[in-house]
Image (spheres, helix red, strand yellow):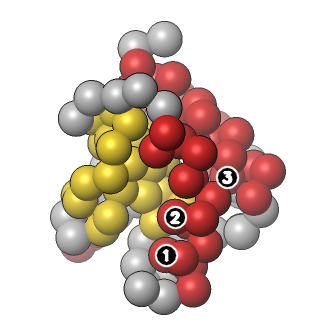
Amino acid sequence: MNDATDHFWNLVDPFLKRPGVSRGTMMGFGCLRYEGAFFATVHRKTGDLVVKLDELRVDGLIEAGLGEPFAPAGRRFRAWVAVRERDDERWLQLIEEAMKRAEGA
């Protein structure tokens, strides 16, 4: 693992203790899943946090300059946003938001 990946897994360790949350893989990235639904990962090459949110929220983060479209292989995933700036507080907030979305809350 690299520094960004290690950092992500250390940061999300408390999530893995929650019911329904597990570790999985998505497109070769280690990720967090809630009852099978992917909701957060770290991009192994860029170190960006990548989370699945409501499309309007994703668009808002991109417009505010707080995130970038997640477009592996050139195809944009509209409900996913990549967050480059490593800010633990913001990352935890976004991961929590993504988990709530995955829970259907």
The one nearer the camera, 87 or 36, is 36
Mark carried by residue 29: none
Residue 63 appears in the figure? no
> Residue 3: which quarter of the image?
bottom right
Comes first in the chain, label 3 or label 1: 1
User: Residue 96, position in %: x, y?
Assistant: 60, 35
- Mark 3 element type: helix
Say which residue appears at 68% left-offset and 46% top-offset: 92
Contact check, label 3 and label 1, Cβ < 8 Å:
no
Contact check, label 2 and label 1, Cβ < 8 Å:
yes
Residue 7 appears in the figure? yes
The kind of residue tagged 1 is: Thr
User: Residue 57, position in %: x, y?
Assistant: 58, 32
The kind of residue tagged 2 is: Trp
The kind of residue tagged 3 is: Trp
Say which residue appears at 48% left-offset and 32% top-offset: 18
Separation (CA) of disc 2 from disc 3:
12 Å
Separation (CA) of disc 3 from disc 1:
13 Å
Q: Which residue is mark 1?
A: 5
- Mark 2 element type: helix
Say which residue appears at 43% left-offset and 58% top-offset: 41
> Residue 24: which quarter of the image?
bottom left
Image position of 15 with respect to 6: above or below: above
Say which residue appears at 40% left-offset and 19% top-offset: 103
Mark toward the viewer: 2 or 3: 2
The one nearer the camera, 99 or 52, is 99
Comes first in the chain, label 2 or label 3: 2
Mark carried by residue 91: 3
Mark carried by residue 9: 2
How would you rate the neighbour count of disc 2 (Cα within 10 Å): few for under 14, some for 14-19, many for 20 or more? Answer: some
Mark toward the viewer: 3 or 1: 1
Image position of 57 with respect to 31: above or below: above
